[in-house]
Image (tube, rainbow, N blue to C red):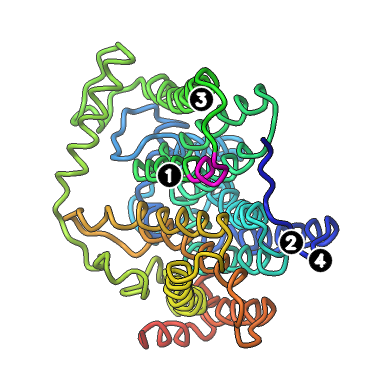
Amino acid sequence: MKISLPSVPGATAASHHAAFLILTLIAILVHFAGLSHPGQVVFDEYHFGKFVNAYCCTRQMIFDIHPPHPKLIMSLFATLGGYTGNLGFTTIGESLSGGPVAALRLWPALTGTMIPLVGFLLLRRWRVPVAWAFAGGLALALDNALLIQTRIMALDGQLILGSMLALWLCEILLEERSTAQRLGLCLGIGAAVALSVSAKFTGLAIIPVIMARLAWHLFDAGMKPSGFLEPVAGFIMALAGFTVVYLIGWKAHFFLLNQPGPGDAFYKVTGNFFQDLFQLHKVMLAANNGITASHPWASPWWGWPTMKKPIYYWVSGDSVIYFAGNPFVWWGLQGSGLLLLVRFAWSAATDRSRHDSLSIGIVLVLFLAWVASYLPYSLVSRGLFLYHYLPPLTWSVLLSIFLWSRLAGRGGFKPRHLMALIVTGFVVAAPVTFGYATLKELPVRLMQLR
């Protein structure tokens, strides 16, 4: 039985491809223009630079509460760029002169470039009109906070990208395809989940989201799986994809770090891969749970959607990098999305016929994605930072755009109006996104108005 999704009136392949191309160019421009600036250590590069040094050069055992995969990839690009481990990464603001700065930041920039593109493709899979889908991709490309975090050595770009890829592949899986194609997609979904989890364990939040999407599809289709063997085989393939990607990173970790180092104080490798892997994970989780120290730039989880307490990432003379988001994305798009969500829920409850089953399912899945990636932080006692909200922010942007595209009676508000607001917010905050001295006080003062 083939389940066809509702078509989008007026949508053409040409407009779809043109929008995707323009979005690609914008994402590349904002992520790679001036990537070597500032030529100094910015915020958490102080930590991740040391890991890159270990993997590429010193081979000394190090310890982190997160898996090694993104640091391994960063070290690979740095090595290809000619890096020799000559930078110390001893303090924020330390000069990176003599090192391939752009190569060190290349992997996060690549992940940041792909996030808005996958967002656009997801929205189009859900039959969102091209203009609204482009606005959603633009919001992800021009959110200043997400942009900052993917222009420096950090993990969040890979975390978000892996989760989005997993859901996108899941959407493709739901189409009528051959058994071999479906099994291949299951393999890809597992690999994408591993990409997310191998950045941070919070990437596990995408698993219940995918399960919910599959369950809603079966409910929407009014049918049961066609057989027992294929779902089991699909699960095995997904597990295989996850296992291969996840274990490859850890195998490289133990292979490369063959010299004594500071990580030995946390766990001494015995030489048995699976035993070391299991024991090290126990130590990582214990170390994560054992962190109780606060931080002057920490902020409460419940204040993140309002952009409570942005962070100074880097200061040099009159130039600063201030971790603050696009105000029209954080306040405008999220705020309007919340109002539309209430409206959608009320109309769906009072008159089920007003919304097709696909729309209800996607809204539920995106809301679950926001909850699953956000509310677990309420259980964490240690100091947390505003950048932890970037995965929930991504899902909330997609949810808001989907609701805007579905609900009638928008008072004449068009995608081009939203795009204009997004670009305006980006330009206003740009001086403290890219670290320019000019007008740096304007976006800082704006953030203080929240």
Q: Are marks 4 and 2 in contact (CB under 8 Å)?
A: yes
Per the rendering, the mark at residue 221 is none
Q: Earlier in the sequence, mark 1 or mark 4?
A: 4
- The amino acid beneath tag 3 is Pro
- 115, above or below 332, in the image: above
What residue is disc 1 on? 206
Residue 316, visible in the rendered structure: no
Asked if residue 46 is among those painted magenta in the image, a careful observer would answer no
Residue at horizontal 42 percent and vertical 53 percent from the top:
369
Q: CA distance from mark 3 to mark 4?
A: 36 Å
What residue is disc 2 on? 8
Q: CA distance from mark 1 to mark 3?
A: 19 Å
Label 1 packing within 10 angstroms: few (<14), some (14-19), many (20+): many
Quarter occupied by residue 355: bottom right
Residue at horizontal 48 percent and vertical 82 percent from the top:
440
Magenta-highlighted residues: 216-222
Residue 19, visible in the rendered structure: yes
Q: Earlier in the sequence, mark 2 or mark 1?
A: 2
Per the rendering, the mark at residue 10 is 4
Circle 1 SS class? helix
Of tags 2 and 1, the one toward the viewer is 2
Q: CA distance from mark 4 to mark 2?
A: 6 Å
Q: Are marks 3 and 4 in contact (CB under 8 Å)?
A: no
